Image (cartoon, rainbow, N blue to C red):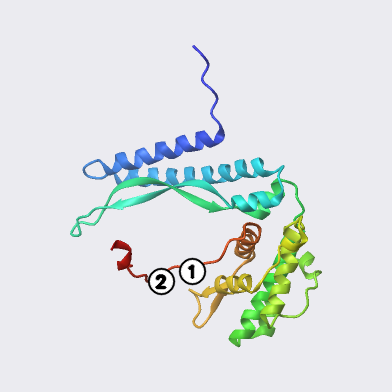
């Protein structure tokens, strides 16, 4: 009998995920529901999903390590495992009747990839400096206490050494700042006419995603931390290297009656 092929860590993580998923559904199938077993299975499921996601990211970074950085930016994401709790249709007795498996896409962590592939990561420091200026720009536009924020904003010593000028007050200045960090991330395009040039749409995208309503303080906008700011930068890089366009959703559409005629 041929020896069974040794499973990869990713396959082992998936086995753990499927085992926990089955245990959760088995607990739900009992009458009454075995809540102790269910909670234990859901804890195992969460652990397995996190392990699978970590291994999936590592596998992708290893695959793209020898390729130009634009290739992993084009790939953009990797697949992870997740779950969805299925509620009962009985409105008078709301309860979870099953846990369904799902797959999800997770955006690459470009900094983690660069560290894995042993690529230059100085762009991370520049991005952090740009993020501080974007924070001060948001504060200025909101009429907040800019001086107080500037003094209390945490910056690593290496970031403090990066001089990018004053707080940007125009879209053109923001465009130049974005170009500075994008130039550090992306290599020069082979065709100078097709170089990766940031434009006003990229600035608008950054502005729209940069802040959100604070859950802790009234009349306060929560700005992006460095990790989320880097995610926005990856989005902008993706648009630049693929020639894609931005979009919006969440609006209420209408039925095109002529399409059915």
User: Residue 258 versus residue 249: which sits nearer the camera?
Assistant: 258
Label count reads 2
Q: Are marks 1 and 2 in contact (CB under 8 Å)?
A: yes
Q: On screen, 135 above or below 82? A: below
Left or right: residue 112 versus residue 158 is left
Q: Look at the numbered disc 1 and give the secondary structure of its residue.
A: loop
**In the rendered image, which residue does mark 2 sit on?**
251
Q: On screen, 28 above or below 243? A: above
**In the rendered image, which residue does mark 1 sit on?**
248
The image quarter containing residue 28 is top left
Q: Look at the numbered disc 2 and give the secondary structure of its residue.
A: loop
Left or right: residue 35 versus residue 68 is left
Residue drawn at point x = 44 percent, y = 43 percent: 44
Residue drawn at point x = 56 percent, y = 70 percent: 209
Residue 154 appears anywhere in the view: no
User: Residue 225 versus residue 113: which sits nearer the camera?
Assistant: 113
Q: Residues within 10 Å of mark 1 (few under 14, many from 20)?
A: few
Task: Please provide percent x and percent y for residue 109.
Answer: 62, 54
Query: Marks 1 and 2, Cα distance to the nearest angstrom?
Result: 8 Å
Left or right: residue 208 versus residue 28 is right
Task: Please provide percent x and percent y for residue 162.
Answer: 80, 69
Residue drawn at point x = 61 percent, y = 41 percent: 59
Task: Please provide percent x and percent y for residue 106.
Answer: 53, 52
Q: Residue furthest top?
A: 1
């Amino acid at each position: 009998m041929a020896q069974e092929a040794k499973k990869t860590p990713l396959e082992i993580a998936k086995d753990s995920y499927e085992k926990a998923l089955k245990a959760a559904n088995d607990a739900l199938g009992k009458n009454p529901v075995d809540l102790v077993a269910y909670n234990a299975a859901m804890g195992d499921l969460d652990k397995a999903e996190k392990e699978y996601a970590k291994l999936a990211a590592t596998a992708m970074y290893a695959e793209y390590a020898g390729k130009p950085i634009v290739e992993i930016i084009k790939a953009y994401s990797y697949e992870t495992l997740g779950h969805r709790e299925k509620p009962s249709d009985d409105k008078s007795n709301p309860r979870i009747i099953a846990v369904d498996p799902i797959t999800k896409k997770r955006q690459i962590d470009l900094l983690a990839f660069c560290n894995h592939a042993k690529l230059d990561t100085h762009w991370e420091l520049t991005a952090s400096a740009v993020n501080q200026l974007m924070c001060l720009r948001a504060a200025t536009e909101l009429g907040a206490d800019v001086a107080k924020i500037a003094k209390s904003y945490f910056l690593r010593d290496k970031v403090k050494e990066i001089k990018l000028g004053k707080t940007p007050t125009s879209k053109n200045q923001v465009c130049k700042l974005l170009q500075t960090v994008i130039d550090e991330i992306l290599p020069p395009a082979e065709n100078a006419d097709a170089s990766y040039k940031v434009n006003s749409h990229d600035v608008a995208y950054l502005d729209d995603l940069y802040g959100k309503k604070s859950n802790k303080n009234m009349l306060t906008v929560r700005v992006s931390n460095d990790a989320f700011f880097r995610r926005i930068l990856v989005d902008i890089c993706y648009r630049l290297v693929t020639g894609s366009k931005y979009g919006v959703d969440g609006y209420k559409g209408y039925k095109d009656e002529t399409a059915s005629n």
